Image (cartoon, rainbow, N blue to C red):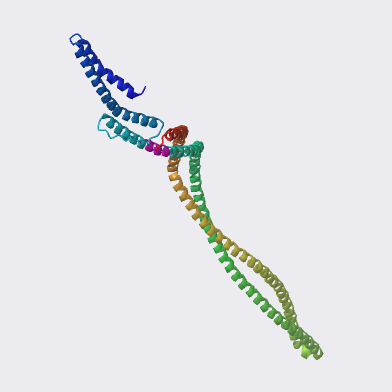
Amino acid sequence: MSIKMKLLIVLSINFLIPIFTFGFYSFNYLSPEEIRTVFIILGIVLIYACVQNYFVIKSIAKPLRMTKLALEKIADGDLNTTMDIKQKNELGDMARSLNRMTTNFKEMIQKIDSASTELAVSAESLTAVSEQTAAASEGVSHAVQEIAGGSAQSAQEADEASQLVGSLSDQLALVHKQAENISGFSTKANNASETGLEKMRHLNESFEASSVSLSSVRDVVVDLDDKIKDIEQVILSINAISEQTNLLALNASIEAARAGEQGKGFAVVADEVRKLAEQSAQATDRVKGTILSIQSQSKKAVEEMNRTKDSQTTQSKSVAETLMAFETIASVFEKVSDSIVTISREVNQINSSKDTVVQSITGITNMTKQSAAACQEASASTEEQVRAFSSVTHTAEQLNESSRELKKLINYFSI
């Protein structure tokens, strides 16, 4: 049964109930003619009421039917449906409200469609970014774990370095003491080298003076040998004169013997001359032997002086080389002494700054330990971040799935 028939029945019943109630109570007081008239009037009224109700119901039923069809289309997802009802009553207001609702719902579905599309894109991007970030976070987690391991190892190595620096500090103190000792030894060695150099210079000067003196003595001996040779020539001449004198004395003695008594005095003189000649010959022989001995000694002296000069030349050369060696040693000792002074000064500076180095190494060790602890905490935080990004990725996937479901629901509507 349609709505129109239901409304017609309801209105007719509502209209006829009071009439029949009035007629039922009025039959006891009316005559048959009056009752007939009443029925005629009631029939006319009823016909008029039915006609009037028909038009009223028609004016109500048509908008309701259009509303029903529009709602069915809307229920089927067709949001392009509009109702063309121009009535100025509640049904027209309802139709216009339904049109606004459809328009608003259509706009809302369009916005939801656009938002779902953007949501799908964002969800896919978020999924990709989350996966990339999760992968990157895993890489960072591994890197942080490696850094944490390296920091722990660095802390251990820094601790060992601190111990080594402490040992190095003791060694520096020992080196500082040894450097001071070496500096003292170097100073003494340098002084000894300078003293030896000075003595070698004096020895070289003495050798040079001795060489000059030896050359002078050799020259004197050579000149003496030359003089002795001259004396030897003179002695030879004297010896020859003595021999001639001896012959002349012998001849004079013979002539005096031949003269007899007159020649005795001349014989005595001749004999004395002969004796003098013999004595002269003997003296010249002794002088000659002495000269020969002097010549032999002089020759030996010259030879010895030549050997001495050669040896002195060699010694002088050795002294000169030794002097040069001493000068080189003195120069080297001076450089070594300067280097030792520099090393000692640097060792002093290092020794004075070792406490600062030890404190710095200790601070570095503590900072490294703190960094290792921070790296471990960062590693735990990174692992937690990886788990959080995994959750975000899972949520993004669910969001992407929800956006696809929402897209399916939106596609149900025709906009």
Question: Can you give x and y, in whole percent of width and height, for residue 70 in the image?
Answer: 36, 32
Tell me what residue is drawn at x 78 percent, y 89 percent: 261
Nearest the viewer among 74 and 112 is 74
Nearest the viewer among 150 and 51 is 51
Question: Can you give x and y, in whole percent of width and height, for residue 415 in the image?
Answer: 39, 37
| 283 magenta-colored | no
Work out which residue is located at the far top of the displayed protein and give it. Answer: 28
Q: Is residue 389 visible?
A: no
Tell me what residue is drawn at x 65 percent, y 74 percent: 221
Work out which residue is located at the far right of the displayed protein and give it. Answer: 258
| 115 magenta-colored | yes
Q: Is residue 19 visible?
A: yes
Nearest the viewer among 329 and 358 is 358
Tell me what residue is drawn at x 59 percent, y 61 percent: 322
Question: Can you give x and y, in whole percent of width and height, for residue 225 in the image?
Answer: 68, 76
Nearest the viewer among 83 and 5 is 5
Helix, strand or loop for the magenta stretch, by majority: helix
200 in relation to 34, above or below:
below
Q: Quadrant of residue 72?
A: top left
Residue 112 falls left or right of residue 262: left
| Labels in figure, total | 0
Work out which residue is located at the far front of the displayed protein and give it. Answer: 33
Question: Can you give x and y, in whole percent of width and height, for residue 409 in the image?
Answer: 43, 32
Location of the N terminus by quadrant is top left
12 in relation to 284, above or below:
above
**Which portion, as a residue range, is magenta?**
108-118
93 in relation to 313, above or below:
above
